[in-house]
Amino acid sequence: MIRVVLVEDHVLVRSGIRHLLEARGPVQVVGEAGSVAEALALLERVEADVAILDVSLPDGTGIELCRALKERQPRLRLLALSMHEDLEYVKGFLQAGGQGYVSKAAVDHELLDAVLAVARGERYLNPSLAMRLAMEMVREEAKEAALSPREEEVLRLLAQGLSHKEVAERLAISEKTVATYRERGMEKLGLRTRSDLLRYAARRGWLKG
């Protein structure tokens, strides 16, 4: 039996999810919470295999909760069930340690499939989200392939926190040349701001050193 905790601020939605899971699969809902604080307190008291988290909660986000639970209970499997289909939410949840993400617009059986999959230690995205994420990864890889080695090197170093002057000294080029490589690289990647660059760098693993 898979023990599940539901974290969703709408009581009727929780009731529907509980009925769906317990009626169709080897699932027992062992607790419910309507906020980040309630979820953290609940999971100190009950043992669960999977926590299903809404991304939007009254006192925080499911992504923040996911990160906190991953630190406190590394073995707990975390699954997002959300109305948000923006890929930034999906990637944010997975990067925070989540194992799966299901849209509330998905058909009913996909939620049970997701719970069973993450309980087995697998990752799960409902098919429409998985396809969109795969297509975005292909587009990003194509953009990155268009970067020259020096453009990528400059963007990596800037994303890691070096100033234009520090990058220029490290690469033995002028600050003006650093700015030129930055502008060209950002344009190729479709990035406009430093925040855009940092998000892109995090996704590509550039911030690890």
Image: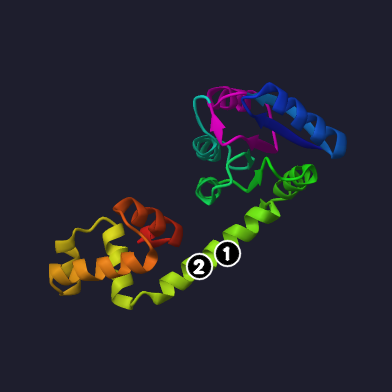
Q: Name the residue tied to disc 1.
A: 135
Q: Quadrant of the C terminus?
A: bottom left
Q: Amino acid at mark 1?
A: Met
Q: Quadrant of the N terminus?
A: top right
Residue 101 pos. (x, y %): 63, 46
Image quadrant in which you'd find residue 32 = top right
Q: Residue at x 60, y 58 (%)?
A: 132
Q: Name the residue tied to disc 2.
A: 139
Contact check, label 2 and label 1, Cβ < 8 Å: yes
In the picture shown, does residue 15 fall above or below 138?
above
Q: Residue at x 26, y 60 (%)?
A: 158
Calculate the distance from the C-alpha at mark 2 to the C-alpha at mark 1.
6 Å
Per the image, label 1 sits on a secondary structure element best described as: helix
Q: Residue at x 53, y 68 (%)?
A: 138
Please say whether residue 169 is visible from this viewpoint.
no
Per the image, label 2 sits on a secondary structure element best described as: helix
On the rendered structure, is 10 left or right of 159? right
On the rendered structure, is 89 left or right of 178? right
Image quadrant in which you'd find residue 160 = bottom left
Give the residues in magenta.
34-57
Residue 195 pos. (x, y %): 33, 50
Q: Amino acid at mark 2?
A: Arg
On the rendered structure, is 118 left or right of 58? right
